[in-house]
Amino acid sequence: MSKTARNGKVDLFKFIFSIVVIIYHFGNAVKFDNELFNKGYIGVEFFFIVSGFLFAKSLAKIPYHKETLPADSVHFMWRKYKSFLPYHFFTFVCTFITASIISQWNISNIAFELANSIPDFFMIQINGVSKMSLLGHEWYISAMLIAMFVLTPFVIKFRDIFLKYIAPALAFFILALLFHSYGNLNAVGAWIGVFNSGFLRALAEISLGCVCFAVSEKGFIEKFPKPVLIITELTLYTLVILYANKSLGSVSELSIVIMLAFAVTISFSPKSSLAFLNNKFVLFLGKISFPIYLTQIFVRQALVKSNLGLDYFSYMGLYVFTVIAVSLLCILICDSIVNFIHKKINKPTAV
């Protein structure tokens, strides 16, 4: 697999963990007995670590120039922010319409809620200016963007010292603080001094992903035989998924995060690549994982409000199927609009 190619294995696990997370959120909403993935929030750790790895990899391509550092940092973050906008906007509109119908808002309510949703619209709700009532699940996107915004100029300017010293220190001390304060990572809206716990969670685990990239750059992983890497990787992911389903008892969540870090590092290793996973279908599973995470909220709201009287597994199956179907529609609509706009912008002018 070339260095520029998409990683089918990572894309596959993106899809798997996106399903784990939405099932966890669904269980919180419907409150059945014997729900699956009661600790499915741990899937967010996978996405933070993967994002940190790719964040460090992307910034490694940007040379440091004192004069252009602010502009380079802003340009990088704008490209990152812009890449989320189409699917986010689709989710915002659909969620707002669904909430207005379910809650039977009048014109006054709509205007009031629309004003309150401005931070959600701009994906800055994690900073405390929003109650996160409309797109609360997007705290993950907000925290990731703000954490990257803070880190970007430092990573460009102090790349070596950040990857080798600052990133490990941030990951270690912040994760320790979160575990000491809450006992687990499932604390999003709490505050530690002036910092939101969700932001700290993102900052720590994006830094951990940067550490994974630094380890990968050194080639330590390549020293092991491919079968050993693949078996270790699959074992680690299996243990994490079992933990998400409360099948590992009282295993420390810090240990689970470390397992994920090792697994992600192996997944990005060319030596552990599985060629049969680098196909269009698996790569599309990676692409759809983001709209799956976004669109879950209004699908869940509509299904819970409908009160269908189904048993848990039927209800959950219908929910997952509907979220995937809506995500496909989201991709179709958003990509079509984006492609249309690009064609209009890039249309050659007549001479």
Image (tube, rainbow, N blue to C red):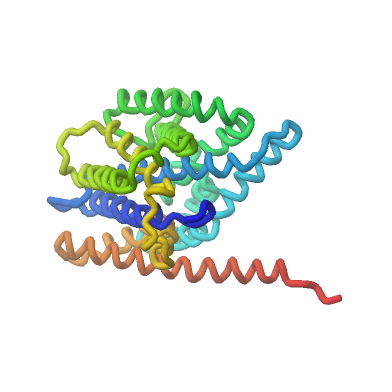
Left or right position of 25 against 292 = left
Q: Nearer the viewer, residue 82 or 242?
A: 242
Quarter of the image for the C terminus: give it: bottom right
Q: Nearer the viewer, residue 90 or 246?
A: 246
Q: Nearer the viewer, residue 52 or 233?
A: 233
Image position, residue 12 (x, y; %): 36, 57
Image position, residue 257 (x, y; %): 32, 36
User: Looking at the rendering, which quadrant does residue 262 occupy?
Assistant: top left
Image position, residue 79 (x, y; %): 61, 50
Q: How many marks?
A: 0
Left or right position of 317 against 333 = left
Residue drawn 20% across and 67% down?
308
Q: Is residue 11 above or below residue 129?
A: below
Left or right position of 315 against 150 = left
User: Looking at the rendering, which quadrant does residue 284 occupy?
Assistant: bottom left
Image position, residue 229 (x, y; %): 32, 44
User: Looking at the rendering, which quadrant does residue 348 occupy?
Assistant: bottom right
Residue 129 visible in the current orientation: yes
